[in-house]
Amino acid sequence: MASVIDPDRHADLVTLQQTVHGLFDELEAYTGTDREGMRERVRQAVTEKETALRASGLVAEHGYFTASQDLKKAARQAAAD
């Protein structure tokens, strides 16, 4: 099945998802003393991405799981290109 994410039309969502992926990578590697502060940065980024995903109408049209999974795949593909 084709992705519900159009890389050009949903570039803002792809960028938000890439930010979330990057922050999760940073959190995993983080060795500093303010781990809770780092977690909060991740939570805020995820909330921003989730809000934008729902506002896009993709969740209402295709369901959360499909929209979310396709967005993650599109972000990984865009990073690989």
Image: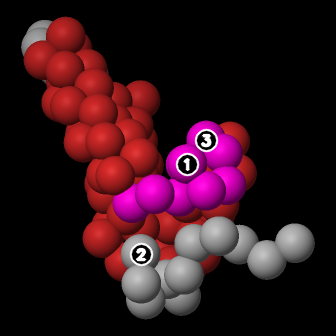
Residue 61 drawn above or below residue 74 = above
> Which three-letter amino acid code belongs to the residue tagged 1?
Ala
Cα distance, mark 2 to mark 1? Answer: 15 Å
**Earlier-in-chain disc, 2 versus 1:** 2
Give the numbered dot on residue 64: 3
Q: Which residues are magenta?
A: 56-64
Percent from the top left, x then y, of residue 75?
50, 66
Q: Quadrant of residue 42?
A: top left
Residue at horizontal 41 percent and vertical 52 percent from the top? 53
> What is the crowding at mark 2: few (fewer than 14 residues within 10 Å), some, or many (at least 20)?
some
Give the colouring mode of the picture. secondary structure
Q: Which residue is mark 2?
A: 10
Q: Are marks 2 and 1 in contact (CB under 8 Å)?
A: no
Residue at horizontal 53 percent and vertical 88 percent from the top? 81
Which of the two marks, 3 or 1, is nearer to us in this view?
1
Q: Are marks 3 and 1 in contact (CB under 8 Å)?
A: no
Indicate yes or no whether the magenta region holds residue 76.
Answer: no
Residue at horizontal 26 percent and vertical 20 percent from the top? 39
Q: Quadrant of residue 46?
A: top left
Any part of residue 23 in sight: no
The secondary structure that most of the magenta stretch takes on is helix
**Earlier-in-chain disc, 2 versus 3:** 2
Q: Which residue is mark 1?
A: 60
> Which three-letter amino acid code belongs to the residue tagged 3?
Tyr
Per the image, label 1 sits on a secondary structure element best described as helix
For residue 28, side relative to residue 42 (left or right): right
Percent from the top left, x then y, of residue 4?
65, 70
> What is the crowding at mark 3: few (fewer than 14 residues within 10 Å), some, or many (at least 20)?
some
